[in-house]
Amino acid sequence: MEIFKTKASLQAYLQNARSTGKKIALIPTMGALHEGHLSLLNYAKPISDIRVCSIFVNPTQFNDPKDLEKYPRPIENDIKLLESVDCDILFLPSVEEMYPDKDEYWHIDLGELDQIWEGEKRPGHFQGVTQVVYKLFTLVQPNIACFGQKDFQQVMVIKRMIAIKDLPIELAICPIIRDHDGLALSSRNMRLSAEGKRQALALSRSLQYVRDHIHNNVPLNKIKQEAEHILMNTAGVTVEYFAICESTSLEEVETIDFSKQHVVLVTAWVEGVRLIDNMTIS
Ligand code: PAF
């Protein structure tokens, strides 16, 4: 695996590859890699010639400086993991390399997506995400970009940015990877104790409850209440939001229209760590 730390060196390498018709896949990450990230790399393997994984803890998407400071950065282990899946290129820039102008202005019209759920709870978060992802897209010019469905709203935001900027990039959305107990894999799980991980299982259990009961003619508000009880009755879990939404607008629904896809979104805190999860209902 080649490691590039500057935009110029990465660009020179990729220009050469592109001129020989190689198909490039980009897997943007913030490191602290786990099986979820590796599944994106594995997905991209048969459909691309060069897989570029970026590791960059992007400061502009953190609205809480403490969260940014505490974000895990186990780079030696990340490199080993990337080598284990034969990743071709790791792009590992510094903050100065990505943001030579500290006051760089960025704004993209994300409509409602910037105002609801993660957009509401983390003001400026999606502006920061799109700012860095747009930089990576411009730099790497990938044919395919891979993202995980765990960040459901983030995927919608990236889709919208691709449409607004009219980028010739195929978006690959890969399923959530869970551990054997159902906990959605997340870099943030590294900050949980064994007990915290056990408590965090309430998130996936609440989602699964909705999925299991939705077809049983039980009113949706009852199902939602029961699912919320799972979360509230688990010591150590503080719910930020729990919502059953239509999946293209993320509008909360009171009844299910079975001709549409829905998604259940949950965000909760465990041991001071903010965790998100979701489950689609088709
Ligand atoms: O999902 C993430 O890890 C980040 O939001 C991303 C897409 C790498 C942008 O920093």
Image (tube, rainbow, N blue to C red):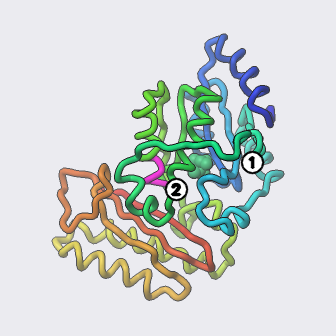
Is residue 240 magenta-colored? no
Q: Earlier in the sequence, mark 1 or mark 2?
A: 1
Magenta residues span 151-155
Residue 82 visible, this angle? yes
**Would the CB of label 2 be found within 8 Å of ligand 1?**
no
What residue is shown at x 65% (from left), y 60% (from top)? 187
Alpha carbon of mark 1 to alpha carbon of mark 2: how far?
A: 31 Å
Q: Quadrant of the C terminus?
A: bottom left
- Residue 224 lies in quadrant: bottom left
x and y percentages locating residue 127 in the rendered image: 52, 49
Q: Is the residue 107 above or below the residue 219 in the image?
A: above
Residue projecting furthest to the top:
20
Q: Residues within 10 Å of mark 1 (few under 14, many from 20)?
A: some
The residue singled out by tag 1 in the image is: 81
Horizontal arrangement in the rendering, residue 163 relative to residue 35 (left or right): left
Q: Which mark is residue 124?
A: 2
